[in-house]
């Protein structure tokens, strides 16, 4: 029979660790990207104050708002 401490450990492993990894990935992606206006600050605040829902919202909605870098110009050797 599983005791309460083992159940808490299993829940921690299956819920908290993946959520923390998702939080870190979202935070790094936000910090490395360019956003219009104050969107970068807003997304950082969203993932900090909504740690479970914030990263999920960012990956579903926020990544579409990034400023895309201009395409690199081709250099011809002619």
Image: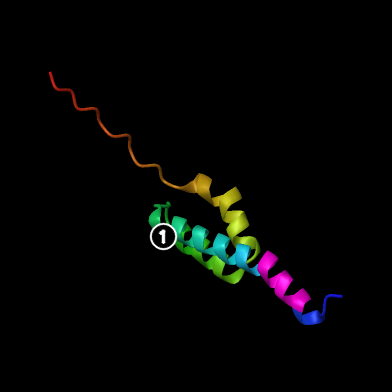
- Percent of width and height locating residue 75: 19, 27
Q: Is residue 7 found left or right of 31 in the rendered image?
A: right
Q: Which residue is the extreme one toward the front? A: 1
**65 relative to 74, above or below:** below
**55 relative to 60, above or below:** below
- Percent of width and height locating residue 9: 71, 75
- Percent of width and height locating residue 45: 53, 67
Q: Which residue is the extreme one toward the right? A: 1
Q: Which residue is the extreme one toward the left? A: 78
Question: Mark 1 falls on what kind of element?
Answer: helix
The tally of labels here is 1
Query: At x 82% / y 80%, what residue is drawn?
Result: 3
Query: At x 28% / y 34%, what residue is drawn?
Result: 72
Location of mark 1 (residue): 31
Q: Is residue 66 found left or right of 4 in the rendered image?
A: left
Q: Between residues 4 and 75, which one lies in front from this camera angle?
A: 4
**Bounds of the magenta span?**
6-15
Reply yes or no: does residue 10 show up in magenta: yes
**5 relative to 34, above or below:** below
Reply yes or no: does residue 35 show up in magenta: no
Q: Between residues 57 and 13, which one lies in front from this camera angle?
A: 13
Main SS, magenta region, reads: helix
Q: Is residue 54 found left or right of 44 in the rendered image?
A: right
Q: Which quadrant is the N terminus positioned in? A: bottom right
């Amino acid at each position: 029979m599983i005791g309460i401490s083992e159940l808490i450990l299993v829940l921690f492993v299956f819920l908290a660790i993946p959520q923390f990894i998702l939080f870190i990935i979202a935070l790094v992606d936000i910090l490395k990207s360019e956003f219009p206006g104050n969107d970068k600050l807003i997304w950082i605040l969203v993932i900090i104050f909504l740690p479970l829902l914030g990263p999920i919202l960012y990956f579903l909605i926020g990544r579409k708002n990034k400023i895309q870098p201009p395409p690199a110009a081709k250099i011809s050797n002619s």
